[in-house]
Image: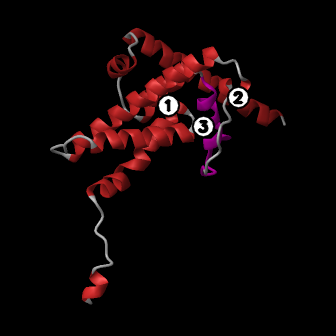
Amino acid sequence: MNLLFKNFIKTPSREEVIYEECHKRLFYTSLRILNNSMEAEEIMHDTLLKYFDREDFDTIRERDAWLKRVCINLSIDRLRKRKVEEGMYKSEELINPVIENEYVENYSFKGISVEDVKNALNSLASGYRLVLSLLLFEGYDYEEIAQITGLKEASVRSQYIRGKARIVEILESKRSNRNIN
């Protein structure tokens, strides 16, 4: 290979490699909690910046668990901050943020599409959405969610049951409306 050409080939830095490995997972974790892509992207960047300020972990598994936990904690903090701000401002834009449409496959099961499920999840109160996201998508159990959120384990179970029931109710209503039309 030509020596001159070798000078133009850039080896990716440690930060670039880790960013490529982790940024999508962190973004979608935060997006499920916050329901806002701009805030989710900011949380993803904040999480990675915190990681780059510390020493490396012994294993990739430890690194990924730490990143996931920090991302979730930052997302919950942002959710709490948003609740405080909503209490201070009664603007319709802040209370009902526009739900952003992103590409979703046109998959359907028994007349319910992926988009329907996403919309039902996004329409839930933030507490229900948070518990469902942590339990169903992130794989935490009730005890871990209680530790993360500061709620009692019984409250986490209750929010999960109520949130799940509300999603089922929304989806059944949507399906029955389609059958009528």
Q: Which residue is found at the position 70% from the left and 28% from the top?
A: 93
Q: Which residue is found at the position 43% from the left and 49% from the top?
A: 24
Q: Given the current orientation, which residue lies at the most extreme left position? A: 58
Q: Which residue is found at the position 58% from the left and 30% from the top?
A: 121
Q: Which mark is residue 93?
A: 2
**Label 3: how many residues lie within 10 Å, few (<14), some (14-19) or many (20+)?**
some
Q: Position of residue 47 (x, y in %)?
A: 37, 39
Relative vertical location of residue 110 with respect to residue 140 in this rendering, above or below: below
Q: Amino acid at mark 1?
A: Ile
Q: Is residue 113 magenta?
A: yes
Q: Quadrant of the N terminus?
A: bottom left
Would you name the residue on which mark 1 appears? Answer: 33
Would you name the residue on which mark 3 appears? Answer: 118
Quarter holding residue 175 = top right
Relative vertical location of residue 132 with respect to residue 41 in this rendering, above or below: above
Q: Given the current orientation, which residue lies at the most extreme bottom position? A: 2
Asked if the residues shown at circle 1 and circle 3 are in contact, with their CB atoms under 8 angstroms apart, the answer is no
Q: Is residue 61 visible?
A: yes
Whole-angstrom CA distance, mark 3 to mark 2, is: 21 Å
Q: Amino acid at mark 2?
A: Glu
- Does 151 sit left or right of 171 as displayed? left
- The magenta region covers 104-124
Sequence-wise first label, 1 or 3: 1
